[in-house]
């Protein structure tokens, strides 16, 4: 077995060039990645807002068809308040949001635990939601 006297390797100039190219690419890619992730979170919250609003209206219609009981009731496993809208816990069941959103705070539906400012607040008295992510800040 013969061992070569000169081992091949990269020069300092070659390594510096590669690091410069990687640094330049990451300078452009990182902000774009951040913007894409923020846009995805806002889109996810828009989907949640539509689901909440539509589910509240559907269950309000079901409540009306059930005779508009003047007390809290349960329709299809969804707890309803006396005004005929799902409660804070009921809207999670009605809209199917409990598994894919951070719902630890009653009435607040956040995109995830790392971005609590990217959320919406459900108002059970009127069956509406108020968004907290319009400008994308904190999202």
Image: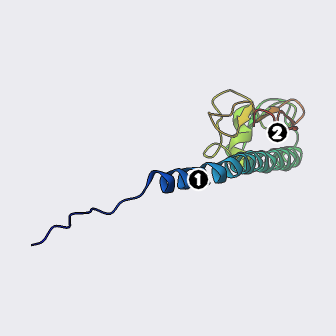
Query: Which residue bears the numbered disc 1?
Result: 22
Left or right: residue 85 versus residue 89 is right
The label nearer to you, 2 versus 1, is: 1
Q: Residue at x 61, y 55 (%)?
A: 21
Crowd around label 2: few <14 · some 14–19 · many ≥20 (10 Å): some
Identify the image quadrant of the N terminus.
bottom left
Task: Tell me if residue 59 can be seen.
Answer: yes
Left or right: residue 89 versus residue 133 is left
Task: Tell me if residue 78 can be seen.
Answer: no
Q: Residue at x 26, y 63 (%)?
A: 6
- Vertical side of 16 occupied by 79: above or below: above
> Residue lying furthest top in this view?
105
C-alpha distance separating marks 2 and 1 = 29 Å
**Residue 65: x %, y % from top left:** 88, 49
Kindly state the secondary structure of the residue where label 2 is placed. loop
Residue 100 is labelled as none
Kindly state the secondary structure of the residue where label 1 is placed. helix
> In the image shown, does 43 or 75 lie closer to the viewer?
43
> Residue lying furthest left in this view?
1
Left or right: residue 36 versus residue 129 is left
The disc, 2 or 1, on the residue closer to the chain's N-terminal end is 1
Query: Which residue bears the numbered disc 2?
Result: 136
**Residue 99: x %, y % from top left:** 60, 45
> In the image shown, does 90 or 19 lie closer to the viewer?
19
Identify the image quadrant of the C terminus.
top right
> Residue lying furthest bottom in this view?
1
Q: Residue at x 58, y 53 (%)?
A: 22
**Residue 118: x %, y % from top left:** 75, 35
């Amino acid at each position: 077995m013969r061992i070569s006297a000169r081992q091949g390797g990269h020069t300092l100039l070659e390594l510096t060039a590669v690091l410069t190219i990687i640094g330049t690419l990451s300078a452009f890619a990182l902000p774009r990645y951040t913007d894409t992730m923020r846009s995805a979170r806002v889109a996810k919250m828009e989907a949640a807002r539509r689901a909440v609003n539509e589910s509240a209206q559907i269950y309000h219609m079901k409540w009306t068809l059930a005779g508009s009981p003047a007390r809290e009731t349960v329709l299809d496993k969804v707890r309803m308040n006396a005004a005929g809208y799902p409660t804070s816990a009921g809207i999670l069941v009605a809209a199917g949001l409990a598994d894919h959103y951070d719902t630890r705070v009653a009435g607040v539906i956040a995109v995830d635990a790392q971005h609590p400012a990217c959320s919406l607040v459900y108002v059970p008295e009127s069956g509406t939601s108020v968004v907290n992510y319009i400008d994308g800040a904190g999202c």
